[in-house]
Image (tube, helix red, strand yellow):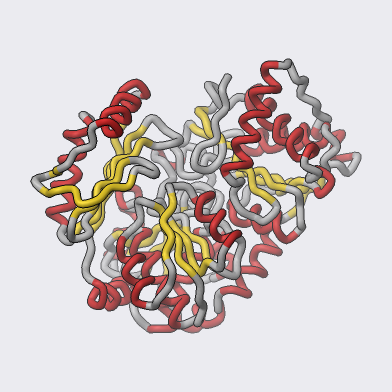
Amino acid sequence: MQIKFGTDGWRGVIARDFTFDNLSIVAQATMDYLNREGLGGKGLVIGYDRRFMSRDFARRVAEIAAGNGIRVRLAEEYAPTPAISWAVWESKAGAGIMITASHNPPEYNGFKVKEGFGGSALPSTTRILEEIVAFNIDNGRRVVAVPYDVAVDKGQIELFDPREGYFHQIARYVDLDLIKKSKIAVAVDPMYGAGSGFIPQLLPDVYEIHGSENPAFGGQAPEPIAQHLHELSELLKSGKYRVGLALDGDADRIGAVDENGDFFSSHCIFTVILRHLIEYKKLTGAVVKTVSTTRMVDLLAGKFGLELFETPIGFKHICELMLERDILMGGEESGGLGVKGHIPERDGILLGLLLLEAMAVSGKGLKQLLNETMDEIGHFHYSRIDRRIENAAKEQLITKLRSQPPLEIDGRRVADSNFSDGFKFIFDNGDWLLIRPSGTEPVLRLYSEAATPDQVGRFLRAAISIAGV
């Protein structure tokens, strides 16, 4: 077995790749790492989402931690990833483990590692974990565990509620009273995930859909993108609500629907919140975006004289910069956004509340806030297509694009390129196309941003032809 950590953790199909045996091997390697680095004595925080058997998988990791002499704080119920990440930082734990496959389809589960700073494990850390896993397999390392009930009785595993500390931090960062007084009619779709019930606890008047427990997530991946939010969109079109917020399976990503019932993408969310942080909260610092994220962020950063960094996809790369530099905001196309004054972590709940705060302060809807900024920096259109691709075909495509990248696409000359993560082709007016194999699924992701929707469509059709999918 070869264990590889993708953009955020190790993930696999339940009962095929993500089994108790494989999980035990990864957990043992993680405990070996923590003890070797002197972090085991600080304890371990463990949380889990609402996926099939997540609670049982989390308990197994806790048993192995106890077997290796590491005290565990285990969430007593499902919880969002950012709540567990906050608990890691707040309790000064050596690390955290979150059992979740985030936005992946229902048949997946996963193992996210959070470092002591409360963010995703850095690439240097996950490389070491992969090496320890391989070494342990090659050398027959025995998994050491204490039965769950025994470990609880001995105090090696302590159950805790991560909500209290997390809610206190949220209330410190966002003006919840202002939002309540504004009486904005809000609908929330947690997509049956670990964020269910969290925003209604902070704002009791919001209306929540898909909050029940459903490990099949209603038959679709719990990813807050346009094609998954039809019901939320219809609620907004009914006129009863002014904004819709959507969370992914572990609530570290955010999506939205505006006052017209139209999908409000992460690019738009990033743009609106960045301006809110600058103009209302009077915060400063550099901005970080991933290679698949909108140019609006570049132009807005330029307007306010903020330094801009671009990284490969995966919030762990943004996290690295947030630890090294004074970063105001960092984000990625998939809806993972993080802000200064919080942990260096994606947080869909906090970012959703910041959208509401921006609306409450301005008295404006999301569409109006975005259009006011676009009127200053230019109007942009964006779309993404995902196509299934087998590994052999994926490797062939990568080889072809590396050795013979196209010089022209849809009759447009490629003015620049960026192959740091996938294959990004940039045109003379700033339009761009990105062809990128997923790091966690047998999927090819095609992204484009251009000045017109028609041009976006033409670029994506050209990408489908280039990739042969």
Q: Is residue 387 above or below residue 303?
A: above
Is residue 8 visible in the rendered image? The answer is: yes
In the rendered image, the residue lying farthest to the right is 154
> Toward which corner of the image does residue 155 lie, by quadrant?
top right
Q: Is residue 206 visible?
A: no
Left-right relation of 329 to 389 = right
| Residue at 17% over, 41% down | 407
Residue 141 or residue 52, whichever sits in front: 141
Is 325 left, or right, of 165 in this rendering?
Answer: left
Residue 404 location in percent, x, y? 23, 32
Q: Is residue 469 left or right of residue 235?
A: left
Is 232 located above or below residue 241 in the figure? above
Q: Where does the N terminus fall, quadrant-wise?
A: top right
- Across and down, in percent, residue 57 comes to 66, 33
The C terminus, quarter of image = top left
Which one is nearer the viewer's eye here, 419 or 60? 419
Please report the residue visible at 89 percent of the width from the left and 40 percent of the height from the top: 153
Give the image location of residue 397, x and y in percent.
28, 29
145 w.r.t. 428: above or below = above
